Amino acid sequence: MLGFVPCVSIHAQLINGSFEDGQGNFDNTGWTSTCPMVWGPAAPGYGDFGALVNHSNAGCNGWSRATHLVPEIANGETWTLGGWCGVFTFPFFSPYVGFGLGWKEADGTLHFFTAPVTNNGTYTYLQVTNTFALAPGDTAFVELDPGTASGGSGNSLFAMYDGLELANLTTGSGVTFPSRELALRTNVAQDQLWLGCDEAILAVQLVELGSGRSVAMPISSGGTTIEVDLRAFASGAYAVIAGTASGSRIARFVKF
């Protein structure tokens, strides 16, 4: 049996998660990169600029990464990261590129959660959810992983990024509450959940709020209404995350 506690979508944009300032100029404030970040094409609906990050071994010596510290993330919280990335220099080079979450210890030691990746030559929407176990002095971060150009190259070859957003599934603190909602409808007898949105749903993720365990749900098409099968899931509180071209829409429900 399903019971629902609806809420508006909650998402918080990183500092310049769309890599533009208030005047629409390219801006990578808040990001630290081992290789220079430069402007690139924007993802659909995200202004005029995205960011390009060198593949490792391609126009930049050594390990290429870009990170953004997120001190607002606290111990025990569950966060989701969504956004757009792709291989700018496809098809000449097509390493797997992506982004993810991690944390840095006080002494600088880095830890990384598993990141979603793509090797497409066009912008692809990716999303991941993780629960943080942070010790005093630890700081969470977002990492852009531009992959490695196999064999190396003297030329600058890039991964492209745009429209990155963070959402706190635990408390909703530190996030904005836009007016658009993710609508929920149920078929109690069959344990089916329908998601409705005002734009096409590109990806769906189900998060068990008690444990932070997340599951990417298969969807048959990218329409504005998606059916999700919940028969394999135990009773409990969940968050459902719908990825769209303009960001993540989130709602909570309880399965009795």
Image (cartoon, rainbow, N blue to C red):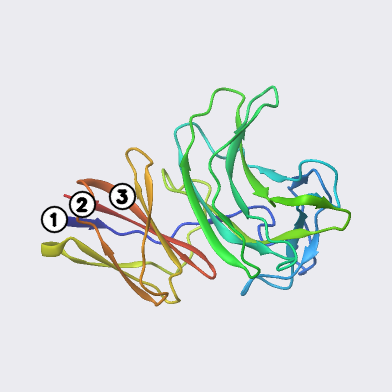
Residue 141 position, x and y percent, is 62, 40
Asked if labels 1 and 3 touch by Cβ distance under 8 angstroms, the answer is no
Which residue corresponds to mark 3?
238
Which residue corresponds to mark 2?
255
Between the residue at mark 1 and the residue at mark 2, the CA separation in whole angstroms equals: 6 Å
**Relative vertical location of residue 1 with respect to residue 201 in this rendering, above or below:** above
Badge 2 crowding class, 10 Å Cα cut-off, few under 14, some 14 to 19, many 20 or more, is some
Quadrant in the picture for the N terminus: bottom left
- Where on the picture, by quarter, is residue 201? bottom left
Asked if labels 2 and 1 touch by Cβ distance under 8 angstroms, the answer is yes
> What label sits on residue 1 in the rendered view?
1
> What label sits on residue 73 in the rendered view?
none
Between the residue at mark 3 and the residue at mark 2, the CA separation in whole angstroms equals: 8 Å
- The answer to which of marks 3 and 2 sits earlier in the sequence is 3
Residue visible at 61% across and 66% down in the picture: 120
Q: Secondary structure at mark 2?
A: strand
